[in-house]
Image (tube, rainbow, N blue to C red):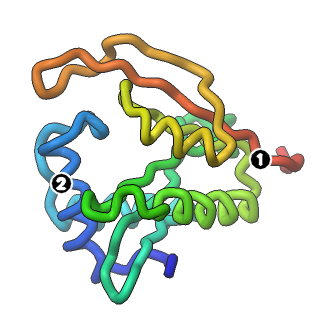
Amino acid sequence: MIRTVRSSDIPVLLEIYNHYILHSPATFEEETIDGENMGERIHTVHGLGLPWLVAEEGGQTVGYAYANRWRERSAYRHSVEVTVYIAPEHIGEGWGRRLYQALFDSLRQNNIHVALAGITLPNAASVALHEKMGMRKVAHLEEVGFKQGQWLDVGYWQINFQGEHEK
């Protein structure tokens, strides 16, 4: 089941995200975050009218996805950055695709024109997921991050949703 995030999800979201902070270059954060910080992030996303979704199976949260503004300037108002994190024990079960499908459906309904995703490279599984969702690589930034003793590249994938929007 995919649903909107609730404040009661914060402890599990922290467990998932902090795992990636500590054990993966997928996020460039290097210090774990706390419940207050996660709550503020959710509040910010919802304050922008954007979706934050949770995947649940048998009452257990297995992952989450959300959209946040791409950039601050007003001309970017129809563009968002999308993010998905899956609990390590549920990777490969199709939750990333299902979460992104629900997220993209919501973004289309809310007149979002472009969604972008930054991927730390190399990451074949994440690249495959984003391309399966119809996203295409539009940029490659070399050695822009340093984590876990190594320089890291970031690629950006983009999807343009159909439809014209009021200006």
Q: Which residue is mark 2?
A: 18
SS assignment at label 2:
helix
Q: Determine whether 167 is above or below 4 in the image.
A: above
Kind of residue at disc 1: Phe
Q: Residue at x 40, y 56 (%)?
A: 92
- Give coordinates of residue 85: x percent, y percent: 36, 55
Q: How many marks?
A: 2
Instruction: Tell me which label, 2 or 1, sits earlier in the chain.
Output: 2
Other-residue count near label 1 (Cα within 10 Å), few / some / many at <14 / 14–19 / ≥20: some
Q: Residue at x 26, y 72 (%)?
A: 10
- Give coordinates of residue 7: x percent, y percent: 31, 79
Q: Locate residue 136: give its quadrant.
A: top right
Where, quadrant-wise, is the C terminus in this rendering? Answer: top right
- Give coordinates of residue 152: x percent, y percent: 29, 20
Kind of residue at disc 2: Asn
Q: CA distance from mark 2 to mark 1?
A: 31 Å
Viewer-proximal residue, 101 or 89?
89
Q: Which residue is mark 1?
A: 161
**Residue 38 in view (yes/no):** no
Viewer-proximal residue, 62 or 43?
62
Q: Residue furthest bottom?
A: 59
Q: Locate residue 18: give its quadrant.
A: bottom left
**Residue 6 in view (yes/no):** yes
- Give coordinates of residue 14: x percent, y percent: 21, 63
| Left/right of residue 159 with respect to residue 89 in the rendered view | right
SS assignment at label 1:
loop
Q: Residue at x 22, y 48 (%)?
A: 20
| Left/right of residue 157 with respect to residue 64 in the rendered view | right
Viewer-proximal residue, 58 or 84?
58
